[in-house]
């Protein structure tokens, strides 16, 4: 078993306390996650720092004046649609792409001009990139041989890595003789074998089927906590990013749109792009009427007043969207209490999804709004059905304002 | 696709193969002819093979040819592989488009022109014509064949394999020898075989660039044939056919074996 690298003085220590054992309750996970927030501590030196990094391919700008800090032992996710520059950003860190301008620092050292084979960074490739002419054991040993490690030591390390990914019995197989999930494990073991300070994962689970992918996401988190290595994952799958990451950076067109922990990213996206990209969002146009005591009051074109949480986000010229997630809305036949935001409309469509039901409701003002209701809370004898008149409601805390 | 044999299909196949192979078949048959007259069959004999091996000029020419073919094929393989690497992997250098177009040009260039231009070059730089100039000329024209063969293999190979090797700490040179080369080896060997056979049977370019003491087998055969075809020549040509056929058969068997091994591996993976 590879030992965790010694903790540096002043380095955040929150995550290491898990020591590999699975936190038993959701609360423990929450507390544990909460305690690891180096990005909020002004004294913590970033482990990786992108400073005004730009990458141009001819006339195309793939990464545009991007600055970003990532901290030691963080599990960081780069999320965005294909072509947003996230893979380019990762490849610049690995050394496969040169930077057009700006600089990347790793543990305080400028990486410019350092070739990929001298960077203390390893990468797990989207295609796994296992060497087809070598056995699984030789694939894992490849990086160690380049270091000039002693033979006996290599054998031990390879055995430990195979055990780490539960592939002990497959060391002599060729990659062609493995299933997709097994190849993914071997690729992971190979990229961890050199005990890098930073592991880059490029869409590591993209080739797995859904069930296996979900399982593997949790295994990745466990592994990262156990090894205490900084992980940076590139993905286009928002659920994957939210499952594994301490912080997520949403990218679009070569720029960072928002960098935040998953909960904050989902509950309080700073703009419409992020709100739309992460999960479903209902948007109703309005104008800011007043802002006080943490509440924004908006007025819709139809003259209706709506109240949303105000957490100090710049609302621009006052033309805003009233934004709320489908699961924050309640649906009822009776008119809701006066203190709630209430919207009236007609059920347009119903989708039964097993655990929950999604209603599409057409508001009287013309907007289509999605409402997600847990099936456990629905009255099975008298459910709300198609073309019924309904009220939708949500408390002030369940909504936020996005600048238009 | 499973199509039935129609009369048309059978006719095309028979005529096609007949067109290709009857001349060679005739040559092989007459190499075992007892008679000195090439076109009159007088019973089976292997005496012309003995005669061919006893003909010192022919044996010398054959030896020169094999040396030229071996050396030029080996150097052409190295250069052609390097060119293919440059064309496939370093996709962003200036003038790549021009370069990759130019590598194909010698494939379609009339041999007379290649031969003549090389001759002019050797004369201009004052290089005496001999075995060296033949070798250089053969490298020049067979290199692009190697480049094309290796290029097609490289372009289907996942570029991230090399990146993975670099990422794991291998220098570019080590990455090439421990990862890239083993994976493109079948194509490199195929390229070598192609260059070898091209050099083996080249007449035109050798004719232009050869000098005294560097007469290749095709040159020798050609000059002898002008004095009349002897069964001896038939025997030599049959040996050449045998060598080339053996090479092709070995290459295709080894490729078939690899294919079978790959399929078996995939079945194993499916069961796992």
Image: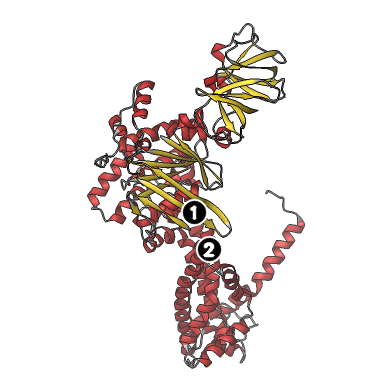
Q: Is residue A87 above or below residue A398?
A: below
Q: Which quadrant would the N terminus of chain A be assigned to in this image?
A: top left
Q: Quickly name the residue at label 2.
A: B92
Image position of B258 (left or right of A320): left
Q: Quickly name the residue at label 1.
A: A54
| Helix, strand or loop status at disc 2 | loop
Give me the residue at 66% from left, 72% from top.
Answer: B22
Is the residue under label 2 in contact with that under label 1 (CB below 8 Å)?
no
Give me the residue at 43% from left, 34% from top.
Answer: A244
Q: Chain of mark 2?
A: B
In the rendered image, the residue lying farthest to the top is A381
Q: CA distance from mark 1 to mark 2?
A: 18 Å
**Residue A288: percent from the left, percent from the top?**
61, 28
Residue A324 seen anywhere in this rendered image of the structure: no
The local crowd at label 1, few if under 14, some if 14 to 19, many if 20 or more residues have their Cα within 10 Å, is many
Q: Nearer the viewer, residue A254 or A75?
A: A254
Residue A255 seen anywhere in this rendered image of the structure: yes
Q: Where is residue A178, by image quadrant?
A: top left
The local crowd at label 2, few if under 14, some if 14 to 19, many if 20 or more residues have their Cα within 10 Å, is few
| Helix, strand or loop status at disc 1 | strand
Give me the residue at 57% from left, 88% from top.
Answer: B208
Q: Is residue A320 above or below residue B185?
A: above
**Residue B39: percent from the left, percent from the top?**
65, 82
Q: Where is residue B14, by image quadrant?
A: bottom right
């Amino acid at each position: 078993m590879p030992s965790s690298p010694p903790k540096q003085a002043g380095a955040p220590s929150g995550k290491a306390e898990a020591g590999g054992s699975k936190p038993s309750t959701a609360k423990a996970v929450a507390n544990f996650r909460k305690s690891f927030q180096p990005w909020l501590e002004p004294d913590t030196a970033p482990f990786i720092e992108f400073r005004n990094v730009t990458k141009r391919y001819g006339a195309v700008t793939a990464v545009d004046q991007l600055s970003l800090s990532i901290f030691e032992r963080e599990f960081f996710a780069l999320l965005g649609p294909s072509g947003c520059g996230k893979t380019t950003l990762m490849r610049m860190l690995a050394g496969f792409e040169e930077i057009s301008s700006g600089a990347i620092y790793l543990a305080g050292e400028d990486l410019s001009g350092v070739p990929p084979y001298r960077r203390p960074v390893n990468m797990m490739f989207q295609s796994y990139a296992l060497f087809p002419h070598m056995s699984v054991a030789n694939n894992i040993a490849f990086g160690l041989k380049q270091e000039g490690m002693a033979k006996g030591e290599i054998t031990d390390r390879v055995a430990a890595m195979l055990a780490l990914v539960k592939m002990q019995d497959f060391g002599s197989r060729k990659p062609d003789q493995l299933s997709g999930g097994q190849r993914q494990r071997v690729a992971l073991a190979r990229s961890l074998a050199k005990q890098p300070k930073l592991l880059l994962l490029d869409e590591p689970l993209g080739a797995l089927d859904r069930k296996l992918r979900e399982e593997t996401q949790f295994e990745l988190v466990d592994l990262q906590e156990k090894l205490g290595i900084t992980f940076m994952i590139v993905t286009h799958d928002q659920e994957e990013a939210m499952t594994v990451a301490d912080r997520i950076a949403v990218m679009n067109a070569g720029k960072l749109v928002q960098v935040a922990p998953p909960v904050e990213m989902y509950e309080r996206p700073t703009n419409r792009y992020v709100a739309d990209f992460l999960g479903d969002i209902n948007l109703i146009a309005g104008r800011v009427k007043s802002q006080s005591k943490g509440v924004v009051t908006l007025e819709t074109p139809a003259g209706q007043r709506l109240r949303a949480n105000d957490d100090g986000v710049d609302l621009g010229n006052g033309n805003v969207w009233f934004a709320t997630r489908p699961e924050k809305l309640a649906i009822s036949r009776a008119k809701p209490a006066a203190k709630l935001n209430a919207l009236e409309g007609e059920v347009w469509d119903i989708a039964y999804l097993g655990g929950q039901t999604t209603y599409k409701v057409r508001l009287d003002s013309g907007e289509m709004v999605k409402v997600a209701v847990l099936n456990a809370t629905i009255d099975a004898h008298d459910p709300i059905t198609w073309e019924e008149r309904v009220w939708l409601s949500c408390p002030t805390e369940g909504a936020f304002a996005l600048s238009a | 696709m499973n199509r039935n044999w129609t009369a048309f299909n059978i006719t095309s196949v028979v005529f096609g193969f007949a067109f290709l192979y009857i001349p060679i078949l005739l040559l092989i048959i007459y190499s075992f002819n007892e008679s000195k007259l090439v076109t009159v069959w007088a019973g089976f004999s292997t005496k012309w093979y003995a005669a061919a091996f006893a003909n010192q000029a022919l044996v010398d020419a054959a030896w020169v040819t094999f040396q030229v073919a071996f050396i030029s094929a080996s150097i052409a393989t190295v250069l052609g592989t390097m060119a293919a690497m440059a064309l496939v992997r370093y996709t962003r250098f200036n003038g790549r488009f021009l370069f990759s177009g130019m590598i194909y040009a010698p494939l379609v260039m009339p041999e007379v022109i290649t031969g003549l231009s090389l001759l002019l070059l050797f004369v201009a730089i004052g290089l005496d014509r001999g075995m060296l100039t033949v070798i250089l000329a053969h490298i020049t024209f067979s290199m692009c064949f190697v480049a094309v063969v290796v290029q097609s293999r490289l372009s289907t190979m996942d570029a991230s394999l090399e990146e993975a090797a670099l990422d794991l700490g291998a220098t570019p040179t080590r990455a090439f020898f421990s990862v890239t080369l083993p994976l493109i080896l079948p194509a490199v060997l195929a390229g070598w075989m192609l260059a070898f056979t091209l050099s083996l049977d080249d007449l035109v370019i050798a004719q232009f660039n050869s000098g005294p003491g560097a007469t290749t087998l095709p040159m020798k055969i050609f000059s002898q044939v002008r004095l009349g075809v002897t069964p001896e020549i038939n025997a030599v040509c049959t040996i050449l056919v045998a060598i080339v056929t053996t090479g092709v058969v070995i290459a295709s068997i080894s490729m078939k074996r690899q294919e079978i091994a790959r399929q078996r591996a995939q079945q194993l993976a499916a069961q796992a």
